[in-house]
Every structure is written in structure tokens, then in C-alpha cells.
């Protein structure tokens, strides 16, 4: 017997209707969630807002540090050291964890923005660097080119006194559920929303009958 005969479901054509409906529902949700993400990201107005998707990363790095800052080494020292772990999130990658030393090394032409005396000027300088960056990889910019040298060193320090709680901290849940009153993670809410979405389609052999679509 031909091995293919054991898999009759692969020999015909699946009815595209049920899958079409499922994909359209999911894709519509993705578009709506993307709009909600953009709305949240743009709700904060500060010096770094013009950096768009990169703004949150730079907020994480510079929050609580007084100006001026005269060099990248001074920044790293005052911002927590090269092994300081930073969490941020991008639409393309989801949440990512970076080591400060790796980020500072990866920012193109970063030494040229020092001394930093004004956050607005820093943001303008970074945006100009991004515009001139031939290797710009999109929304995540230089983050996709980070080497993670210091991150690997930080992970090796797990057995020592290094605080890696950022790796396992609970993510912020959405609002309380109107049904049960509990707080659910975004993933749980999305999974629940699509729990009743079933894709059950068989495959039928082609009969050879000509069909014209009008």
C-alpha cells in the first residue's frame, strides 16, 4: 500500500471556510491589540517620547540619574553597573531582558552624545544616529544586534549574590475579571477569548469536476 493511502486527510483539499473564519478572527484581534499597544506607548509624554519604540529602554536606563553624565563608563557605573538587568518589550520580540553593559556597547556612535546635559538633546541626538544607521533593523533598532556578553556573565552569577529576580518577576495582570473577580494575565485572557474557536475540517478528494468561481 502506498504510504500516502494511510493519510487520506492529506490527499484532498480542506474546506477553507472554518480556517478562514478562525484566522480572520485572530488577525483582527492582533490588529486591535497593536492599536491598543500604540495607544499605551504614546500615552507618556517626556523627553524620550520622540524615540517611539526605543523610548522605554532609555527610560529604564536613565531613570533616577542626575545630569550631567560625562562618559559611557560614568553612565554604566551610576546606572547600576554592566551586569544590571533591564527588561523592556517590543512588538516584534515581546519582553526581552538585557544587560546594561551590552546595551551601552551596542548603541551606534554612543560616545558622540556625551557629555549628556539635557535629556531632550540626548533624544534628538539618538534619533539622528538612528536615521543615519545603515544597519537599522526596524522597530527594535540596535537591540537585535546586542551581543549579550554581560548578560551571559550575569546568568553565570546566578549561584552568587547577584539579584536576578527581574528574570522571574510576575507580569502585570489585566483588570479584574467581571465574571469571577480574579485578575488574569494577558495571555490567559486571550486564551480564554479564543477557547471556543474550533477548527475541524476534513479533506475531500478532488473529483475532477470543473468549478468556476464567479
Image (cartoon, grey):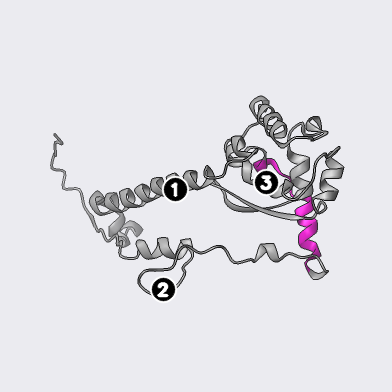
* Mark found first going from the N terminus, 3 or 1: 1
Q: Quadrant of residue 107?
A: top right
Q: Which residue is mark 1?
A: 36
Residue 164 image position (x, y, % from top left): 73, 64
Residue 77 image position (x, y, % from top left): 85, 49
Q: Which residue is mark 3?
A: 59
Q: Badge 2: how crowded within 10 Å, few (<14), some, or many (20+)?
A: few
Tell me if 108 is positioned left or right of 70 in this view: left
Q: Which residue is mark 2?
A: 181
Seen at 23% across and 50% down, the residue is: 17
Q: Badge 3: how crowded within 10 Å, few (<14), some, or many (20+)?
A: some
Would you say the residues marked 1 and 2 are in contact, meaning their CB atoms lie under 8 Å apart? no
Q: Nearer the viewer, residue 209 or 33?
A: 33
Q: Main secondary structure of the magenta part?
A: helix
Provide the secondary structure element on which disc 2 rests: loop
Tell me if 10 is positioned left or right of 206 in this view: right
Q: CA distance from mark 3 to mark 2?
A: 33 Å
Q: CA distance from mark 3 to mark 1?
A: 21 Å
Provide the secondary structure element on which disc 1 rests: helix
What segment is highlighted magenta in the picture?
143-158
Q: Is residue 147 magenta?
A: yes
Residue 117 image position (x, y, % from top left): 79, 35
Q: Is residue 46 magenta?
A: no
Residue at the top extreme, as displayed: 132
Amino acid at each position: 500500500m502506498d504510504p500516502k493511502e494511510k493519510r487520506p486527510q492529506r490527499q484532498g483539499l480542506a474546506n477553507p471556510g472554518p480556517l478562514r473564519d478562525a484566522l480572520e478572527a485572530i488577525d483582527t484581534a492582533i490588529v486591535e491589540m497593536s492599536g491598543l499597544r500604540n495607544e499605551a506607548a504614546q500615552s507618556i509624554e517626556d523627553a524620550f517620547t520622540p524615540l517611539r519604540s526605543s523610548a522605554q529602554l532609555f527610560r529604564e536606563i536613565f531613570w533616577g540619574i542626575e545630569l550631567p553624565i560625562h562618559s559611557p563608563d560614568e553612565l554604566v557605573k551610576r546606572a547600576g553597573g554592566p551586569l544590571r538587568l533591564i527588561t523592556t518589550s517590543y512588538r516584534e520580540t515581546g519582553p526581552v531582558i538585557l544587560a546594561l553593559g551590552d546595551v551601552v556597547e551596542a548603541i551606534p556612535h554612543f560616545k558622540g552624545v556625551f557629555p549628556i546635559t539635557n535629556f531632550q538633546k540626548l533624544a534628538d541626538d539618538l534619533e539622528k544616529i538612528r536615521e543615519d544607521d545603515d544597519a537599522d533593523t526596524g522597530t527594535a533598532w540596535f537591540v537585535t544586534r546586542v551581543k549579550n556578553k554581560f548578560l551571559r556573565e550575569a546568568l553565570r552569577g546566578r549561584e552568587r549574590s547577584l539579584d536576578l529576580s527581574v528574570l522571574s518577576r510576575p507580569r502585570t495582570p489585566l483588570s479584574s475579571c467581571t465574571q469571577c473577580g480574579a485578575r488574569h494575565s494577558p495571555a490567559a485572557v486571550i486564551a480564554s477569548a479564543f477557547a471556543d474557536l474550533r477548527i475541524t475540517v476534513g479533506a475531500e478528494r478532488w473529483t475532477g469536476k470543473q468549478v468556476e468561481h464567479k
